[in-house]
Image: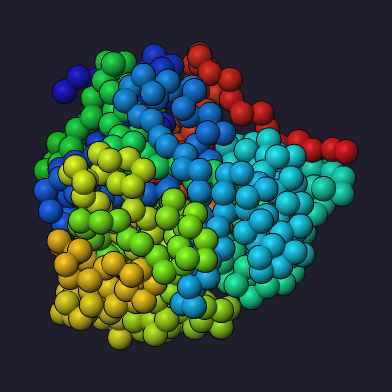
Amino acid sequence: MANYDGIIIGAGHNGLTTAAYLSRSGQKIMVLEANPEIGGGTATEEPTLPGYRANLHANFFMGLSQAPLMHDLELQRFGFSYLEPEVQQAGVFRDGSCVVIHKNLDKTCDSLARFSKHDADTFRELHHRYVVELRPLLLSLTYNAPLSPDQLRDRLSGPKAKELLSHAKHDLFSVVSEYFNDDRIKTLFTSYMHVITTENEPGSGMVFPGIFANVTGFTLPVGGAIAYPLACARIVTAGGGAVRTNARVREITTSGSRATGVVLDDGTTITADRFIASSIDTPTTVAMTGRDFFDDDVIGKLDNWHWGNHSLVTLHLALKQAPIYKARDFDPDIDAAFNVFFGMEDLDEVRSCFRDCERNRFPDVLMGNGACNSAFDPSYAPTDRHSAFWWPFAPYATDGDPTNWDAKREHYTRRVLDVWREYAVNLGDENVEARYLYTPLDIARQNTNMVQGAVRMGAYIPDQLGVNRPHPCLSGTRTPVEGLYICGSGVGNGGGMNGAPGYIAANAIVDDLGLTRDWTPVAPPEWSE
Ligand SMILES: Cc1cc2nc3c(=O)[nH]c(=O)nc-3n(C[C@H](O)[C@H](O)[C@H](O)COP(=O)(O)OP(=O)(O)OC[C@H]3O[C@@H](n4cnc5c(N)ncnc54)[C@H](O)[C@@H]3O)c2cc1C
């Protein structure tokens, strides 16, 4: 086996982001992936019928136009590009009304003003604050290792920064209710705030500014989410490295206090001269390395790692015609909306859905968001056909047993489709060519990194966010084991298609090894007025 400078465990988008950056720094990298295909949470498959492509997990890449990755890695040159639909989000309601969020601010405010002039004005103000003014700060918070509350207070000063940090005192529902008055608008934004599946606990309000900043920054990967890992893999091989599939790592080997290599399930040993970065969940990474290397406090926390109260159940449809929502009579722009929310009519229904998930019940109120990608990028379906999905929130285990997802698959498929049909007028059998339900149990089977169907490799609760993810000793991607880094969603800024943990780990490795870089790192967070 050839010698490698570094080994990356897991070929999802974070592992491959780290690998691609380090390849650009002249490192020879081996990326090891357990599955037969690379991609992890960026898998694109044809689950309904041949030619109908679907992103099984990540579909909405948020804030890519601002992220450093596109430019630094020249991703377009290596085959990755994205679309940014003009009509970004919509919430549709049973009575045929809808709220529509455009890239164009005036159009959004016109839509909101049909419900509340106050809320339209508030949106304009928040847009100015987070999407325009504080955007560089939010970007530097995302692409740098998380700071402790004290460090944040030291580095960020002035009324705007104070306002930004003040959200951390509240839960998400109350932040939204504080800003907006109208019930439907509150319902849409509360649901929108959950697109990153935060649990609504005290303190969860801290994610509000970052998520709000992306409200008009949703992009669709051209040809499928898989285009991102494929582009990064090309960068790795262009740099003399390799990406190996069907290669599950079972152990990280050490010599003294230094990481030296890995052992695969089949017994193969692969060594690395300089570093190892694991993009898989932190409890597994620590177990594979040896618990003795880590403080009791870290081990205690990882032993009680909270995977999340809710996952997602996705209904994929192969269609003759794209979904048409009843709400088109109210606002024809709904026809062009990318990310469409429905199922929840008011805040009580949103609460009821999450309560059911927490109690491991199939929710009485099915609510969530979805899209018809082929309406924007025809490569997602055969000519004149469509590929659409809707993913309501759901628990990993229904009635306490995850295998119920298999036993009752037909029943659950009907339940999800029936709700979708309440909002869309053309989803009768004559339009639906095939359907496929991808359940939380399927998620866990497809990707062992998504334990219990965990969308984010660990719940988004204040104790598992920012510097607490997974623990202040590890959140910066470095570990107590020399040469071992964690570059996946279980650290720092968490999951989601922004490549942030992968990017932060790559920069840490470059700094520690004194390597050269051909990119300028995102400046550390600073704000004063
Ligand atoms: C249904 C669903 C919908 C989602 N939608 C969105 C969305 O629209 N937008 C968004 O931003 N995010 C979304 N997410 C979250 C997103 O998919 C994840 O945050 C992201 O994919 C995590 O990337 P990662 O590289 O950290 O981990 P992963 O993509 O999980 O990569 C880890 C890789 O490691 C491999 N692996 C595991 N164990 C081993 C081992 N022992 N040895 C070798 N390899 C191993 C896995 O097979 C996997 O390929 C969604 C998630 C789900 C489940």
Can residue 360 be spotted in the picture? no
The residue that appears at 54% across and 43% down in the rendered structure is 217
How does the figure colour the protein chain or chains? rainbow
Please state the horizontal and vertical placement of residue 340, each as a whole percent of the image: 44, 60
Please provide percent x and percent y for residue 410. Answer: 17, 77
Q: Residue at x 53, y 18 (%)?
A: 519
Which residue is at a point 74% across and 45% down the rendered structure image?
128
Quarter holding the C terminus?
Answer: top right
Nearest the eye: 73 or 306: 73
Residue 502 occupies quadrant: top left
Residue 61 screen position, x and y as percent? 44, 44
| Image-based side of 107 in relation to 481, left or right | right
**Closer-to-camera residue (146/413):** 413
Q: In the picture provided, is 472 more to the left or to the right than 329?
A: right
Q: Nearer the viewer, residue 511 or 428?
A: 428
275 shown above or below 348:
above
Q: How many marks?
A: 0
At a point 50% along the width and 37% down the height, the residue shown is 64
Q: Position of residue 50 (x, y in %)?
A: 11, 48
User: The N terminus appears in which quarter of the rendering?
Assistant: top left
Lateral position of residue 430 relative to residue 424, left or right: left
Residue 320 visible in the snapshot: yes
| Residue farthest along the front direction in this orientation | 329
Compared to 507, does 306 lie above or below? below
